[in-house]
C-alpha cells in the first residue's frame, strides 16, 4: 500500500513540475516563435523586439524604394551577443506586400504609406501683454 501512495505522489509531482515548466517556457521572451517579426516594417519590428527586452541591429537591405523605417523585415537572426539582426527588403514589391497584409496601416510611423503621419500640435500664440506702466 505504501508503494502505491509513493508512486501516485511521484506521478502528481512530476506532472505538476511539467505544467510549471511549460508555463515558464511560454512566458519566456526568448522563445524564437514569439520573436518572429518577418514581414513587418522595420520600425514596427524594432518596437516589438524592444518591448520584449531585446536589442536589435541592422543587417543590411535590398532595394532603395523605401525609407529604412518602412522597409519590410525579410529575414532575422539571433546573434550570439543576444541581439536580433534584421535584413530588410526596401523594394516597391515589399511595400505592396505589406500594404496587402495591413502591416503598413498599423503602428502610425511618421510618413508611413497608408499610416498616420505624426504632426506637432498647433498651439495658438497669444498677443503679448502691453508693458505695465
Image (cartoon, grey):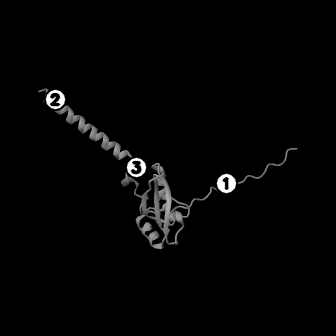
Q: Report the residue marked by disc 1.
A: 123
On residue 30, the disc is 3
Q: If the image is split into quadrants, where does the C terminus sit?
A: top right
User: What SS does tag 3 mark?
Assistant: loop
Which type of secondary structure does the marked residue at label 1 adopt? Answer: loop
Between disc 1 and disc 2, whose residue precedes?
2
**Counting residues from the N terminus, which is met first, the one under dot 3 or under dot 2?**
2
Q: Nearer the viewer, mark 1 or mark 3?
A: 3
Q: Quadrant of the N terminus?
A: top left
- The reply, left or right, for residue 111 in relation to residue 23 is right
Image point (43%, 60%), residue name = 76
Q: Are marks 1 and 3 in contact (CB under 8 Å)?
A: no
How far apart are the alpha carbons under marks 1 and 3? Answer: 44 Å
For this orientation, the residue located farthest to the left is 1
Name the secondary structure under disc 2: helix
Task: Please state which of residues 4 and 113 is positioned toward the viewer in this rendering.
Answer: 4
Name the residue nearer the viewer: 45 or 8. 8
**Above or below, comparing residue 28 to residue 110 in the picture:** above
Look at 67% across and 54% down and name the residue there.
Answer: 123
Determine the residue positioned at 37% across, 51% down: 31
Mark on residue 6? none
Where does residue 112 sit, x and y in percent of width and height? 52, 64
Q: Residues within 10 Å of mark 3 (few under 14, many from 20)?
A: some
Is residue 105 something that shows in the picture? no
**What is the residue that sits farthest to the right in this orientation?**
133
The picture places residue 103, in percent across and down from the top left corner, at: 44, 62
Tell me where residue 47 appears, x and y as whole percent. Answer: 49, 54
* Numbered tag placed on residue 5 in the rendering: 2
Give the CA distance from mark 3 to mark 2: 39 Å
Q: CA distance from mark 1 to mark 2?
A: 75 Å
Mark 1 vs 3, N-terminal side: 3
- Nearer the observer: mark 1 or 2; the answer is 2
Amino acid at each position: 500500500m505504501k508503494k502505491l501512495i509513493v508512486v501516485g505522489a511521484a506521478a502528481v509531482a512530476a506532472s505538476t513540475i511539467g505544467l510549471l515548466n511549460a508555463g515558464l517556457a511560454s512566458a519566456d521572451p526568448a522563445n524564437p516563435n514569439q520573436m518572429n517579426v518577418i514581414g513587418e516594417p522595420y520600425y514596427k519590428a524594432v518596437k516589438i523586439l524592444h518591448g520584449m527586452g531585446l536589442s536589435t541591429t541592422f543587417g543590411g537591405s535590398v532595394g532603395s524604394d523605401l525609407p529604412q523605417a518602412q522597409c519590410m523585415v525579410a529575414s532575422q537572426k539571433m546573434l550570439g551577443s543576444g541581439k536580433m539582426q534584421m535584413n530588410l527588403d526596401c523594394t516597391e514589391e515589399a511595400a505592396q506586400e505589406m500594404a496587402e497584409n495591413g502591416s503598413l496601416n498599423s503602428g502610425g510611423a511618421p510618413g508611413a504609406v497608408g499610416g498616420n503621419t505624426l504632426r506637432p500640435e498647433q498651439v495658438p500664440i497669444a498677443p503679448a501683454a502691453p508693458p505695465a506702466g
